[in-house]
Amino acid sequence: MECCRWTTAGTLLLASLVLSSRTARSEEDRDSLWDAWGPWSECSRTCGGGASYSLRRCLSSKTCEGRNIRYRTCSNVDCPPEAGDFRAQQCSAHNDVKYQGQLYEWLPVTNDPDNPCSLKCQARGMALVVELAPKVLDGTRCYTESLDMCISGLCQIVGCDHQLGSAVKEDNCGVCNGDGSTCRLVRGQYKSQLSASKLDDTVVAIPYGSRQVRLVLKGPDHLYLETKTLQGVKSENSLSTTGFFLVENSSIDFQKFPDKEILRISGPLSADFTIKIHYAGAADSSVQFIFYQPIIHRWRETDFFPCSASCGGGYQLTSAECFDLRSNRVVADQYCHYYPENSKPKPKLQECNLDPCPASDGYKQIMPYDLYHPLPRWESTPWTACSSSCGGGIQSRSVSCVEEDIQGHISPVEEWKCMYTPKMPLVQPCNIFDCPNWLAQEWSPCTVTCGQGLRYRVVLCIDHRGVHTGGCSTKTKPHIKEECVVPTPCYKPKEKLPVEAKLPWYKQAQELEEGTAVSEEPSFIPEAWSACSVTCGVGRQMRLVKCQVLLSFSQSVADLPIDECEGPKPVSQRACYSGPCSGEATEYTPEETQLLYGSLQEFDELYDWEYEGFTECSESCGGGVQETVVTCLNKQTREIADETLCVSSRRPPQLLKACSLDPCPPR
């Protein structure tokens, strides 16, 4: 309508405007057949970046070269958060218009690679996508992550300086045409550590002002957010469904899949965000994250300090102070030292108060001060002993400003003379590493296969480096033994002595009588004993012991590795007695008596598993693990034997300990 009104007015007043329009023509149009450009139209938007146009008329009966319309951007101020998305507003305007006889709630379809300037909308909760208008309104962004805007149905390039056709772009820190020096890239990976005592854990803390945040979780667990504004207001968002959310004025794109979750925040964040993980399954999850963190602490040069002399010539210096851009206040220098990108400005020295003193008859010659004797400097006493041996303590010292004269004599002076450099701290933390703590290993299997028994675990005192040490309080030591109950009922036949069985053979006869049936739980199943190795006297019997399980569906028995069965493994060899040889008396020799009563060491008891130290650390720094080395040993000779000789005893559990906990040097 504005175009039509302008055209009609131009037709009626053409004769009176010819002279003025000719004088208003620009240099580039002076020799052409175009009239002067008309006024700029109203902006298509009131915020968020819109477009305005200007028209001109061809004064020739022939075709003029060039265009009769030009555009510029306008209203380049951010819209309030409650204003919503401009493309979404255009889609929702059709909610009251029936499409094919039915009303829908329309949502915007963004980032169309084929025609980003058409108004395509999708019905909420449905796969229906419709082009509701061939062109979006002027000023609509072509793509969600770009400043390019649609004008008259065409996508026009817009630079970060908000000029049409400009190729100037923001750097990763959000600075237009910047060099990326005001932020730093942070990337890393988190792996979940399942614990019975923890339901969630912190993945990463992302500070205020960060940009281009992206996290990808792979696994059964779930992400959620905690935020804290600069005013200290805290909130939480569970991120339960896929969609776009507004959290503390920051737009969040969250996608939830069966096996992974993706979180994107273009930023800048308007609060401190803490990304947390909620454990939801037995499997481990991993989270990869990347974002650009603003360097919020930067050096700022101070003004010159007061002159060192009121007359006759003196000097004055500048200094540098660490400034917090977020809170607009000066903070301790250590915050600026945290960023390697920050280089502290060197102090500047200049002469001052050069007028002669009243008692002087001429100007005092000013020479470069530091060529003759050093500038005033801070000096400190040694640190006191730390107030605590671990867990964090405090140590202190005294600091004073001193000056050295030409003869090398040092004397205290006013502190302001040393203020060109920061005063050294008077106190500092010390021994901030954790005190030794008890570390309990995993429980052993229950000592019985049914009913009530005991289980054991190893408890070590570990220091902050992961080394086994002393110093832990005995009052807080976890217990190393506790009762356990195996839910399998115990079925024992009534004890009875075999006919003519004598006391030494009771145990053997009882074992013959007690058979073990295969069940749906892995269990040790011994086969029948072999015949005695001798026909008279004391010999040996052998049998095969398998780990088996009953497959209920097929009602078949499957052999399993020995490690799959819990509880003590039945013996595979034992002594046997076949009666006296050659009519000998039935009295036993001392050796036979010891053997029959179990005092003589059985073959199965000759070999056993033992710990032989730890492997090398898996990492050289930043935290690693060491595993125990378990070997099969001959108890008598202490020599390493083949592992098959130890199969009758249960292999001890693998133990882990932390190592190389010192942080890795920065790359």
Image: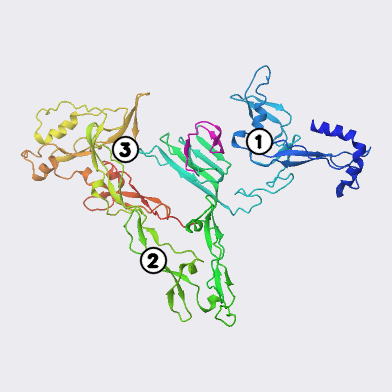
- Distance, label 1 to label 2, CA atoms, is 63 Å
Q: Quadrant of residue 577?
A: top left
Q: Earlier in the sequence, mark 2 or mark 3?
A: 2
Tell me the number on the disc at residue 562: 3
Tell me the mark number nearer the camera, choosing from 1 and 2. Answer: 2
Measured as percent of width and height from the top left, residue 338 is found at 49, 56
Residue shown at 74%/45% (left/top)?
165
Q: Is residue 529 visible?
A: no
Q: Earlier in the sequence, mark 1 or mark 2?
A: 1
Magenta stretch encompasses residue 413: no
Q: Is residue 296 left or right of residue 139?
A: left
Amino acid at dot 2: Ser
Magenta stretch encompasses residue 239: yes
Q: Which residue is mark 2?
A: 398
- Distance, label 2 to label 3, CA atoms, is 68 Å
- Label pair 2/3, CB-CB below 8 angstroms: no
Front-lying residue, 234 or 633: 234
Amino acid at dot 3: Ile
Measured as percent of width and height from the top left, residue 465 is found at 36, 54
Front-lying residue, 82 or 60: 82
Q: Which residues are magenta?
A: 231-257
Amino acid at dot 1: Asn
Tell me the number on the disc at residue 111: 1
